[in-house]
Image: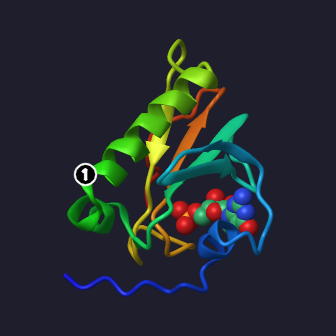
Amino acid sequence: MAYAYDDQNIFAKILRGEIPNRTVLETDHTLAFEDINPQAPVHVLVIPKGAYVTYDHFAAEASDAEIVDFHRAVARICAEQGLAADGCRFISNAGTHGVQDVPHFHLHILGGRPLGRMLSAG
Ligand code: 5GP
């Protein structure tokens, strides 16, 4: 499958420093920052610095170093935000059916309150 990356997407602009963000964690290959429109007391977006459109694109084409760095960053954020005790939710929307608004792979980490069932009907 071919993945066409649009380097004008908002997260690409954040990575280039063209738009500010509230950084939670930055590593060699990964940036995590607060969602501008939080849906829970904790709502962090974790993105690779590389140009990947969706999670499956990242999983297929990123280097081992990028993949390890990304997931270790997720673990660090969960620990630092104290999410282990009560749990949280990881979401990554992809494409049209997934209703992905920003076409740069991002993992939502949501927590700090009960989040309800995963999907509502429709
Ligand atoms: P998606 O629907 O693509 O999974 O989620 C995109 C997320 O990006 C939304 O939760 C939205 O609030 C967030 N977002 C959109 N623009 C910005 C921005 O400029 N800064 C930050 N921090 N978050 C953004």
Marks counted in the figure total 1
> Which image quarter has ligand 1?
bottom right
Location of the C terminus (image quadrant)? bottom left
Residue at position x 50%, y 17% in the image: 84
Nearer the observer, 21 or 114: 21
Q: Name the residue under label 1.
A: 64
List x then y, in percent, for residue 97: 38, 73
List x then y, in percent, for residue 60: 21, 64
Q: Is residue 85 left or right of residue 63?
A: right
Q: Within the image, what quadrant is residue 5 found in?
A: bottom left
**On screen, 10 above or below 21?**
below
List x then y, in percent, for residue 10: 65, 75
**On screen, 99 above or below 63?**
below
Nearer the observer, 38 or 48: 48
Asked whether mark 1 lies closer than 8 Å to ligand 1, one says no
Q: Within the image, what quadrant is residue 86 found in?
A: top right
List x then y, in percent, for residue 62: 29, 62
Location of the N terminus (image quadrant)? bottom left
Nearer the observer, 56 or 18: 18
Kind of residue at badge 1: Asp
